[in-house]
Amino acid sequence: MEEPKPEILETFENKNPERNYEIEISCPEFTCVCPKTGQPDFATIRIKYVPDNLCVELKSLKLYMFSYRNTGEFHEHVTNRILNDFVSACDPRSVEVTGDFNIRGGIKTVVRATHKKDN
């Protein structure tokens, strides 16, 4: 199994750091692998954040999300790992990552992980 590549994430300068505004990103074609069965897991990953000095560059985010395709990880860990890598890359004021995983074996999972910068 491969590991995701957080170093892919690029950022650019936020030209309005004096203002709180929210950015919502949806990745409806997210795929990783179940670490127990090796079967693919499909999800929509949603990222909602208030940038500080940096914004995430979307093409790099797409490539980062694609890097999970052969990664074996539980839904809870995937969602928190994306949050950790996102915070490391752009240090937002606040961010929520939601992993909305498709039904598998009669079970649906939605995982939300949040981070808020200390003032």
Image: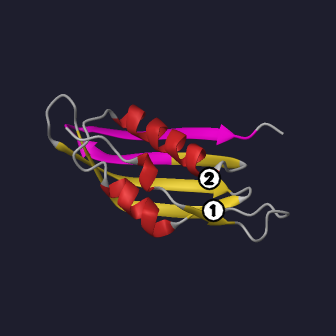
Residue receiving disc 1: 55
Q: Farthest top residue?
A: 36
Between residue 48 and residue 101, name the one nearer to us: 48
Residue displayed at 44% across by 63% down: 60
Between residue 47 and residue 119, name the one nearer to us: 119
Compared to residue 119, the image places residue 29 above or below, namely: below
Q: Are marks 2 and 1 in contact (CB under 8 Å)?
A: yes
Per the image, label 2 sits on a secondary structure element best described as helix
Between residue 59 and residue 45, name the one nearer to us: 59
Residue range corresponding to the magenta coloring: 98-117
> Where does the C terminus fall, quadrant-wise?
top right
State the image quarter where residue 71 is shown.
Answer: top left
Q: How many marks?
A: 2
Compared to residue 16, the image places residue 106 above or below, namely: above
Q: Amino acid at mark 2?
A: Cys
Main secondary structure found in the magenta portion: strand
Q: Residue 36, image x and y in percent?
A: 18, 28
* Image disc number at residue 15: none
Q: Is residue 42 left or right of residue 18?
A: left
| Residue 10 belongs to magenta span | no
Compared to residue 63, the image places residue 40 above or below, namely: above
Q: Residue 93, image x and y in percent?
A: 73, 49
Q: Amino acid at mark 1?
A: Cys
Residue receiving disc 2: 90
Whichever of labels 2 and 1 marks the residue nearer the N terminus, that label is 1
Q: Residue 116, image x and y in percent?
A: 70, 40
| Residue 111 belongs to magenta span | yes
**Crowd band around label 1 with a 10 angstrom C-alpha radius: few (<14), some (14–19), many (20+):** many
Residue displayed at 30% across by 40% down: 3
Compared to residue 9, the image places residue 111 above or below, namely: above
